[in-house]
Amino acid sequence: MKVPSMIAAELRRLTSTKMGIIALLALMLVPVLYGGLYLWANQDPYAKLSDVPVALVVDDEGAPSASDPDTNVNYGDDVAETLVEGAAFDWQRMDADAAASALQAGDVDFAVTIPSDFSEALTSASGTDPRQAVLKLATNDANNYLASTMGTQAVEKIRATVAEKVGTEAANRLLTGLSDVRASLVEAADGASQLADGAVSAHSGGASLADGTAQLASGSARLADGSAQLADGSRRLADGAHQVADGNARIAAAADRVGGAISQAQSALPQVRADLRQALSDRGLADAEIDEITALLQPLGDRVDAATGQAQTAISQIDQLAAGSATLASSADALAGGAGTLSSGAAELRDGASAANDGAAKLRDGLATLSDGTAELRDGLASGVDKIPASTADQRAAQADTIADPVRITTADDASAEDYGAGLAPFFGALAGWIGIYALFLIVKPVSRRAVTALHSPLRITLAGWLTPALLGALQMVALMGVLTIALGFRFDNFVGALGVLVVASATFTAIILALNIWLGSVGQFLGLVLMVLQLVTAGGTFPWQTLPGPLAALHHVLPMGFVVDAMRQLMYGGDITRALWDLAVLAMWMVGALVLAAIGVTRMTHRRTLRDLQPSLIG
């Protein structure tokens, strides 16, 4: 009997009765029902999140705005309005008691509460008691565990949105403040420039002042020395003047006495002349003789008169000299006193000028330091102005947005699935292929006993036992691909390649389950179920295989379903064809290895019978 005849005979056996046909059709539809229904149910669950009921409790009482204390803000109401308008979930505003009751009863999947101090906490950053605002998430895993996960993600997104909004406002205030600081710095820089120019002029004036005070100190020192000499000379002059005045006073006194004596002599002269005439007359001289004799006294009288006049003139001059010398002595005393005062004042002037010179020198040095400092201040303020760029209100708004949300994510996908269902399709397509073959082996005989008896070719027997379910499995995969593309609308970047991978995978799974059945019978059928469970968790169809425990991660690189999933992803999403070809090569090695193992088992069966052949099967 040839292989096609054996395949035809097995097909006639499967379709010999109505119940057989129904059973075959039902099992043929297992992959379609499993893969199609599951992927249909999970095709795009994220598009239905707007139907998920969520309680939203807003207790926020608002707070004064950080930028304008006269204005009240209520971030809680703003957040609530944004959430309701966004319709990411079916947000239902209610009070805290109603939300708790709804969550307990399962009327909502989770509840988000915005507390009364929400706005106050958000605006506290500009005050003396900054603190974080709180969003309260209440979940009930008894309703749905994934709903709790979605709630956590939703609250995190709300937190990020609020943080961005508040950060934008804070950054805008900061940038506006910096702009005001820059304007003030510009004015300060202008003032510092003028101050620096004035300090330079002041330093120049201070240097001139120091030079002048140095000259004043030198001159006042010389004046002090000269005035000291003048005071000493004037004191000696006063002493001399007093001596002169005393001498002149004594001379004047003597002159007065001489003048008195001369005056007495002049006054006594007429009496003498009269006494002489009387004496001469008494002696009997004639008047003529008396006149002759008295005439002899006339020159003496003239000389006495002349002497008296000269004496009076001299006495007058001596008196004037005495008065002048007294005046001179008095003036010399005044001059000595003034010279002393002058000397004392000149000494004070010298000391003051020296102190002024020291002060002027310090002032000059201080003004030099001031000039350097104001120059540094001018340069520093100018540098500060340069470091704070000028900006407009629009620029500050853009900068605030960037500061609050500095990172924007862009994606560049080498290969991408269009939705959640498309992401799961490779895994559930591969799993449906295994389940379909496993179900077929419930009614398909792995090896025909008639063929074993009639034929002695293990290779033909093995091919016949493999090709029959493999062809039925190929039909299953064609039907599954039809459902995925037509009914569910999944897009395949390489449809023919993806169909080919599923057909090859089905044929590989057929060879594996065939080998298990040939070698172990009903136990092998059970092991096929165990092997399906192992591949379900190691194929990496949902979470990345790197998240698996070590032993299971190692099985990922060995068991065939992981290679089917990888090849389907490459061909469905437009990935690397080379990887898909390598995956097909691994499947081919599994298929050939399983067929060789099955042929060895068939060879054993054609050469001898075992007690297992006579025992009834525990399964099927």
Image (tube, helix red, strand yellow):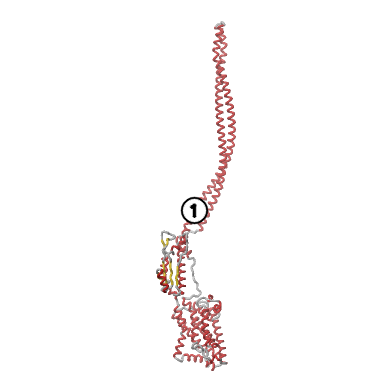
* Residue 585 location (% of width, % of height): 55, 82
Q: Residue 282 placed where, x, y %? A: 56, 6
**Image vertical order of residue 136 relative to residue 233, above or below:** below
With respect to residue 362, does 48 lie above or below?
below
Towards the viewer: 101 or 148: 101
- Percent across and percent down for residue 269 are 55, 13
Q: Quadrant of residue 235?
A: top right
Q: Which type of secondary structure does the marked residue at label 1 adopt? A: helix
Q: Residue at x 51, y 50 (%)?
A: 195
List the single residue furthest toward the bottom: 454
Can see residue 239?
yes
Tag 1: residue type?
Answer: Ala
Q: Provide the residue designation for mark 1.
A: 188
Q: Residues within 10 Å of mark 1 (few under 14, many from 20)?
A: some
Return the x and y of residue 618 as percentages of the image width and height. Answer: 51, 88
What is the tally of numbered marks visible in this picture?
Answer: 1
Asked whether the viewer can see residue 171, the reply is no
Between 534 and 163, which is closer to the camera in this rendering?
Answer: 534
